[in-house]
Amino acid sequence: MTFVDSRDPEAFRKAITPKTRAIYAETIGNPKLDVPDFEALAKIAHDAGLPLVVDNTVGVGLVAPIEHGVDIVVASATKYIGGHGTSIGGVIVDSGKFAWNNGKFPEFTDPDPSYHGLKFWDVFGNSPGWATSPSSSSCACSGCAISDRPSARSTRSSSSRARDAAAAPAPALGERA
Ligand SMILES: Cc1ncc(COP(=O)(O)O)c(C=O)c1O
């Protein structure tokens, strides 16, 4: 991971190497409270075949990064959806616009041994959303990264978060992602 000056989009471009897999920024940076130029960062990312991922935790309900070219929006569910501190969690919203089949993301395009050779991109393609509409990224993420690997959620945290989500206002669930 390479940290750059978030006020300088060109610093992001200069930091990209053949190993880079995403550009990552925060809507309203913690603790600087700065707002990056999403359109400039999206262009730099897309020119390099990379997704722009934005942590919209502080901007939930206020800022819609996908409308400004962002590919993936993440937010801490611990804050606005939970708010109680009993369990941590997060939300990932895929714009459905990024071409994960550009050769840089074999985990989406190559056969996955843990799913009997399933190719996520071939089966699910790309579609916006998260659990409500399967896409390559959401299925690979929920199927492999979360369910099968050590980041699996505890049942108690899952149950707590499901109740929080049922009670949360729509913007907190990423309606304006
Ligand atoms: C912008 C931002 N994103 C994500 C997090 C992580 O939140 P948590 O791990 O509590 O869900 C924090 C924590 O302060 C934050 O400020």
Image: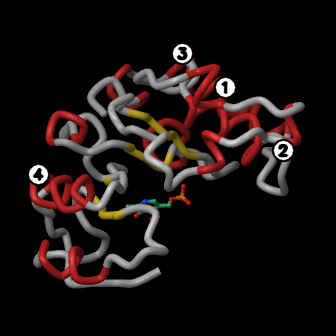
Give the amino acid at mark 1.
Ala
Task: Give the structural element (helix, strand or loop) at label 4.
Answer: helix
Image x and y of residue 150, in percent: 84, 57
Mark 2 or mark 4, which is nearer the start of the sequence?
A: 4
Give the amino acid at mark 4.
Glu
Give the amino acid at mark 2.
Ser
Left or right, residue 149 beside residue 138: right
The CA distance from mark 2 to mark 3 is: 22 Å
State which quadrant residue 93 falls in: top left
Q: Nearer the viewer, mark 1 or mark 3?
A: 3
Q: Residues within 10 Å of mark 1 (few under 14, many from 20)?
A: some
Mark 3 or mark 4, which is nearer the start of the sequence?
A: 4
Task: Give the structural element (helix, strand or loop) at label 3.
Answer: loop
Image x and y of residue 54, in percent: 33, 53
Report the residue marked by disc 3.
132
Q: Nearer the viewer, mark 4 or mark 1?
A: 4
The CA distance from mark 4 to mark 1 is: 34 Å
Mark 2 or mark 1, which is nearer the start of the sequence?
A: 2
The CA distance from mark 1 to mark 2 is: 12 Å
Left or right, residue 5 beside residue 154: left
* Point 22% across, 57% down: residue: 47
Q: Is residue 12 above or below residue 114?
A: below
Q: Nearer the viewer, mark 4 or mark 3?
A: 4
| Residue 54 can be seen, yes or no | no
Report the residue marked by disc 2.
154
Report the residue marked by disc 1.
162
Give the amino acid at mark 3.
Thr
The CA distance from mark 4 to mark 2 is: 37 Å
